[in-house]
Amino acid sequence: MKLFAHSKNTPTFDRIATKPMEVKDVASTALAQNPVIGRMLEYNHEQLVFCNDNETGLKAIVAVHNTILGPSLGGTRFWNYNNETEALIDVLRLSRGMTYKSAVAGINLGGGKAVIIGDPKKIKSEALLRRFGKFINTLGGKYITAEDVGVNTRDMEIIHNETEFVAGLPVSMGGGGDPSPVTAYGVYVSMKASAKEAYGTDSLAGKKVLVQGLGNVGMHLVEHLAKEKAILSVYDISEERVKIAVEKHGAKSISPDKMFDLDIDIYAPCALGATVNDDTLAKLKCSIICGAANNQLADEKVHGEIVTKKGILYAPDFVVNSGGIINVYYELDGYVRERAMAHAEKIYDTTWNIIQTAKTEKIPTYMAANRIAEQRIEAIGKIKVRF
Ligand code: NAD
């Protein structure tokens, strides 16, 4: 029995990064004929579930991208999308991203994501969340949800009334609690692995690091870096957060208009996505980019190439910040923070391997990370069909 049959015309998983023409043609033809399944075909999604409930106003889409490594896991985004197509594209893109993140992190999870369409401030209610929980439950564990933009720990508790397939619960409910310390530790070890490549030593002592964003992850990262005697420049839109970093960790406060003119060694984006773009790359003087923010490259292909050409070592964001998903993974099996931290420590080796693969194969680091993820899924997929 073939669980994952791949014909010549089917876009196989390992073709995602370097899609041959005929696969693109199949996808675009299918998209023209069928805008939903056509989009699923493009990135080989397994399943899409559309949910509607007139009583509560719930409109949601659950996307299961790939379950070769395990149940699909990814947060639920509650967002006021302009239209359904925007929501559909977001859930497809984000669920695929989760497949790669978990695969490269070495955990047994597939990629999934859910979106709820609407303004959470206006329509979020206990009934709506519980109805959503009921829909998740119908998937029988094929999709496990967690927090994302617009959805918090309390909401997870409410959803949990209707389904056990919820992660990101508070410690009091057997969950892992705030994943940020684990994420920050992963960023820190990833930065050390990058430093080993760039400077021949993984010590960050005396290295000039710019941390943008001093939230849950950024502040924990600053703490690690200060302990190692890195020279810290920081910026956050919150003056209060900057004050803490300056007073507690000896960081220097930087104004946003000067941030990218600084002479630094390492840039750590820990706030928003897309900060590695045409404008910032024209100014950035650093040898490493390594931070927690998701989707740091404004355009993965374009800016992934430019970064490489400029001789900047870019540690792929979904590898660097995988401590968050690692933390959630250990929640599924009776949470012990030490186990999550021990696994997060491996992000050092993963980063190192990706850098070496990129060098050997003469490809950008983000592409090397994608390949390593795809190879793992391919290899495990093969043993899964054997008894
Ligand atoms: P957070 O909301 O706690 O912190 C974000 C910080 O960024 C806040 O202090 C905010 O004031 C600041 N900020 C917002 N806009 C800014 C701007 N324009 N310039 C500078 N600072 C700005 O978030 P977090 O949990 O620390 O996560 C940080 C990033 O890492 C996010 O992109 C998140 O998606 C990503 N991430 C977080 C985790 C996790 O475990 N928390 C896991 C994976 C990825």
Image (tube, rainbow, N blue to C red):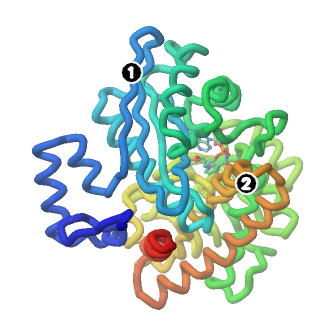
Report whether 237 appears left or right of 272.
Answer: right
Neighbours of disc 2 within 10 Å: few (<14), some (14-19), many (20+): many
Is ligand 1 within 8 Å of the beta carbon of the residue shown at mark 1?
Answer: no
Neighbours of disc 1 within 10 Å: few (<14), some (14-19), many (20+): some
Is ligand 1 within 8 Å of the beta carbon of the residue shown at mark 2?
Answer: no
Residue closer to the observer: 356 or 192: 356
Residue 330: numbered disc: 2
SS label for mark 2 = helix
Judging by the rendered image, the residue that carries numbered circle 1 is 52
> Residue at coordinates 85% horizontally, 60% vertically from top-left?
338
Distance from disc 1 to disc 2, alpha carbons, whole Å, reads 32 Å
Q: Quadrant of residue 133?
A: top right
Return the x and y of residue 95 as percentages of the image width and height: 45, 49
Residue closer to the observer: 261 or 155: 155
Look at label 1 and name its amino acid.
Answer: Asn
Q: Earlier in the sequence, mark 1 or mark 2?
A: 1
Residue 253 seen in this snapshot: no
SS label for mark 1 = strand
Return the x and y of residue 344 as percentages of the image width and height: 72, 64
Report whether 280 appears left or right of 317.
Answer: left
Return the x and y of residue 371 as percentages of the image width and height: 44, 75
Look at label 2 and name its amino acid.
Answer: Tyr
